[in-house]
Image (cartoon, rainbow, N blue to C red):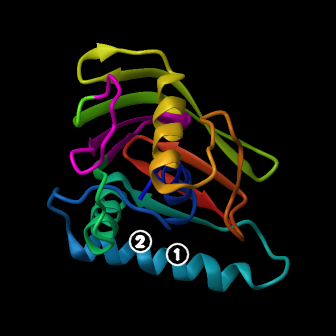
Amino acid sequence: MNFLKIKKLFYCFLFSGAFFGLASQDYSLPEALKVFRAIDQIKAESQKNGGPLRKIEITESELNSYIAYRIEKEKEEIMKEFHLKLFEGNWVEGKISIDLRNYRIFLFLPPQMNLYFEGHLQIKARKVNFKFKKLFLENQPIPVFFFDLILYISAQIDKTETSSIKKWYVLPYGIRDIKTRLHRVVIYY
């Protein structure tokens, strides 16, 4: 998996539960399955035309279990951990553990690293973006554009199109809005 996928996954799991997070972390299968059921419910109910706006809540623990389950099942090679903390007002903090030991990258990047981030989830016109406020490599603050460098390197490894952290993504089918609360995400569809 490349870092472009990591970014897409980061956005999409928040909105549809369609993505993943951490491979080596313990998780609760019942919690992960609850997110799968929520995804199915959103898909099924979004098929209906009209009607009032509906919502579904997913706890931080359920979301992180789902993320961990997906990384484990998809046998992620580069991203070894992706863990989120959810706060009021679409504020999100997280950790991404990356393992590049199996790739020949002759840059200043360490073969194993932990990225810590915080920022604001932005939703507008059924599109989503994550505005990074802080980014750390281990305990060292680094410029936010460093994430674009990681995306570029990943795209080169996987021979895919390069993306940017500034890009806006269309919300998955049926999703109209997303709001984070303390330790939970509310998905409106």
- Residue at 67 percent of width and 68 percent of height: 54
Q: Nearer the viewer, residue 80 or 133?
A: 80
- Residue at 41 percent of width and 59 percent of height: 1
Which stretch did the figure color magenta?
83-109
- Residue at 77 percent of width and 85 percent of height: 48
Which element carries disc 2, helix, strand or loop?
helix
The residue furthest right is: 50
Residue 39, above or below 123 = below
Q: How many residues crowd mark 2 within 10 Å: few (<14), some (14–19), many (20+)?
A: many
Q: Looking at the picture, how far across and down is residue 186, in whole percent?
A: 54, 55
Give the residue type that dot 2 points to: Val
Residue 33, above or below 110 = below
Residue 156, above or below 107 = below
Q: How many residues crowd mark 1 within 10 Å: few (<14), some (14–19), many (20+)?
A: some
- Residue carrying label 1: 39
Is residue 107 rendered to the left or right of residue 89? left
Which quarter of the picture shows residue 189?
bottom right
Number of numbered markers: 2
Residue 143, above or below 112 = above
Report the Cα–Cα distance between label 2 and label 1. 6 Å
- Residue at 43 percent of width and 28 percent of height: 118
Q: Nearer the viewer, residue 108 or 182?
A: 108
- Residue carrying label 2: 35
Give the residue type that dot 1 points to: Ile
Q: Looking at the picture, how far across and down is residue 178, in whole percent?
A: 61, 51
Q: Looking at the picture, how far across and down is residue 56, in whole percent?
A: 54, 66
Is residue 67 rendered to the left or right of residue 128? left
Asked whether disc 2 touches disc 1, contact meaning CB atoms under 8 Å apart, the reply is yes
Asked whether residue 24 is drawn in magenta, I would say no
Asked whether residue 91 is drawn in magenta, I would say yes
